[in-house]
């Protein structure tokens, strides 16, 4: 699977989620594609019947979800027109139609770097909207700046543990990241693991040298 197809699937394919039952067993549940979930999050529906529902019974529109969905749908429609695809105003359908047309009109094997980057950004934005990442402090110095504390300008105070890990309960490796609040350096899961492992190896070597008689 190419990076582009994977990025398209991440937005347009049904999402498989593992759910834990009360008895401790797990079950895989299929949810709508992320673009559909974002659209569903907009709300704004009214009750059935000729007169509709009372004002206080109407769903509240999520303006942020509407804004994000409109931006994505507009961009996907523009991509479709460039690829000679008539957009349907359904970005889930349109994005897959664009992918098929784009693959047919490609003249080289060069990666679609811009499109992949944009699609991944949309995925991250939707996930942040639907399921904000959880945060956990890490008890290690920053691999980049070596800081063991960080300054919070909003409180005017200094805190320990500048490294913070972000993750989603049902997410994969690509949903894990780390950020240093002292120097703003960022890492994905593999990069952070390598940095911490390299630092641990270096410290072990230094200790071994100190313990070895000269």
Image (spheres, grey):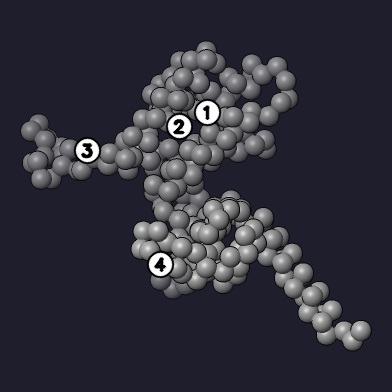
Marker disc for residue 92: 2
Residue contact between numbered discs 1 and 4, judged by CB atoms under 8 Å: no
Please state which of the two labelled residues, at mark 2 or mark 4, is closer to the viewer.
4
Q: How far is disc 1 from disc 4 in space, using C-alphas?
A: 49 Å
- In which quadrant of the rendered view does residue 23 lie? bottom left
Mark 3 or mark 4: which comes first in sequence? 3
* Rendered residue at 51%/50% (across/down): 16
| Marks 2 and 1, how far apart at CA | 7 Å
Q: Is residue 180 above or below residue 206?
A: above
Q: CA distance from mark 3 to mark 1?
A: 27 Å
**Quick check: 168 above or below 158?**
above
In terms of secondary structure, where does tag 2 sit?
helix
The answer to which of marks 1 and 4 sits earlier in the sequence is 1
Kindly identify which residue carries mark 1: 96
Q: Secondary structure at mark 1?
A: helix
Q: Quadrant of residue 87?
A: top left
- Between disc 2 and disc 4, whose residue precedes? 2
Numbered badge on residue 45: 3
Q: CA distance from mark 3 to mark 4?
A: 45 Å
Residue 42 horizontal/vertical position (percent)? 30, 39
Mark 4 crowd level (few <14, some 14–19, many ≥20, 10 Å Cα): few
Give left or right: position of 66 versus 136.
left
Seen from the viewer's position, the closer of residues 95 and 82 is 82
* Quadrant (top left/top right/bottom left/bottom right) for the C terminus: bottom right
| Residue 169 as seen in the image, left or right of residue 53 | right
Crowding near the residue tagged with mark 1, few <14, some 14–19, many ≥20 C-alpha atoms within 10 Å: some
Q: For the residue labelled by badge 3, is the local secondary structure a helix, a strand or a loop? A: loop
**Foreground: disc 3 or disc 4:** 4
Q: Position of residue 151 (x, y in %)?
A: 46, 63
Give me the C-alpha separation between circle 2 and circle 4: 46 Å
Q: Residue furthest top?
A: 84
Residue highlighted by disc 4: 157
């Amino acid at each position: 699977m190419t990076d582009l197809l994977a990025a398209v699937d991440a937005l347009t394919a049904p999402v498989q989620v593992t759910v834990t039952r009360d008895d401790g067993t797990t079950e895989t549940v299929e949810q709508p594609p992320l673009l559909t979930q974002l659209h569903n999050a907009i709300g704004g529906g009214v009750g059935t019947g000729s007169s509709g529902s009372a004002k206080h019974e109407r769903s509240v529109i999520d303006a942020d979800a509407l804004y994000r969905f409109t931006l994505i749908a507009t961009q996907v429609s523009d991509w479709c027109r460039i690829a000679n695809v008539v957009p349907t105003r359904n970005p889930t359908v349109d994005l897959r139609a664009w992918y098929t047309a784009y693959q047919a009109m490609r003249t080289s094997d060069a990666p679609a770097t811009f499109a992949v980057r944009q699609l991944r950004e949309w995925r991250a934005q939707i996930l942040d909207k639907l399921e904000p990442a959880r945060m956990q402090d890490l008890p290690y110095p920053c691999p980049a700046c070596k800081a063991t504390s960080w300054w919070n300008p909003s409180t005017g105070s200094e805190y320990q543990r500048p490294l913070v890990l972000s993750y989603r309960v049902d997410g994969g490796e690509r949903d894990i990241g780390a950020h240093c609040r002292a120097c703003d350096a960022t890492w994905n899961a593999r990069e952070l693991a390598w940095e911490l492992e390299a630092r641990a190896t270096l410290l072990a070597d230094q200790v071994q040298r100190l313990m070895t008689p000269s």
